[in-house]
Amino acid sequence: MPEQPVIFIKPNSAVSDVLRLVSDGEVGYEAELCFLIRDKAICGVGFGLDLTKRAVQFILKAQGLPWERAKAFDGSAVLSEFVTFNGDITSLSFRLFINKTVVQVGSVEEMMTSPNALLTEAQTFLSVEDNDVLMTGTPEGVGSVNLGDVFLGQVFQDNVLLVEQQWVVV
């Protein structure tokens, strides 16, 4: 486990509600719980896909360079709607289906760093503003985005469905 959480920044141009295949190489997906920030605190939860240009990431990693070219491209943060939740944040979980098959399952309880601790860490080096989104880590099961695939993301609190979003890769 790293001493500090690894944090990537995605610009506003990365945020999308459309799941697009990019033309310059393989794009990988990672399903994540996402938290909406207001008044410097978590106020809502949603589902997100963190997209990565894998070939670009491989080259950058090999050279010891930052990964923004692989992680922060336009449309690389595909987000659902956000809803408020009541109760313990550790009761939140999520699932990702691709073409009706479960490919990722995760929960706050399994995270190396809690969402509140991630927010606190981020605030040590950047200003957090209303409507910023904190995308968390991802469980095993990452893979590639393919044209025509149907992605379905779900967020639960104590097994009660809070958010459900479907995307078809265009």
Image (cartoon, rainbow, N blue to C red):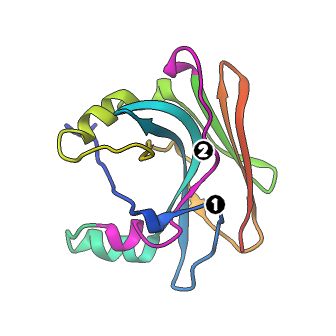
- Name the residue beneath numbered marker 2: 47
Q: What residue do we see at 20% from left, 68% from top?
A: 64
Left/right of residue 105 with respect to residue 10 in the rendered view: right
For the image shown, how many numbered marks are present on the structure? 2
Q: Is residue 114 shown to the viewer in this render? A: no
From the viewer's side, name the closer residue of 9 and 67: 9
Left/right of residue 62 with respect to residue 161 in the rendered view: left
Q: What residue do we see at 42% from left, 36% from top?
A: 38
From the viewer's side, name the closer residue of 132 and 2: 132
Which SS type dominates the magenta stretch?
loop
Residue 73 part of the magenta segment? yes
Disc 1 marks a residue whose amino acid type is Asp
Element class at badge 2: strand
Alpha carbon separation for disc pair 2 and 1: 11 Å
Left/right of residue 86 with respect to residue 39 in the rendered view: right
Q: Residues within 10 Å of mark 2 (few under 14, many from 20)?
A: many
Disc 2 marks a residue whose amino acid type is Phe
Element class at badge 1: loop
Q: Quadrant of the C terminus?
A: bottom right
Q: What residue do we see at 34% from left, 57% from top?
A: 9
Name of the residue lying farthest toward the bottom: 23
- Name the residue beneath numbered marker 1: 17
Image mark for residue 153: none
From the viewer's side, name the closer residue of 145 and 122: 122
Q: What residue do we see at 53% from left, 68% from top?
A: 75
Image: 34 above or below 19: above
From the viewer's side, name the closer residue of 1 and 91: 91
Please tell me which of labels 2 and 1 falls first in the chain.
1
In this picture, which residue range is highlighted in magenta?
A: 67-91
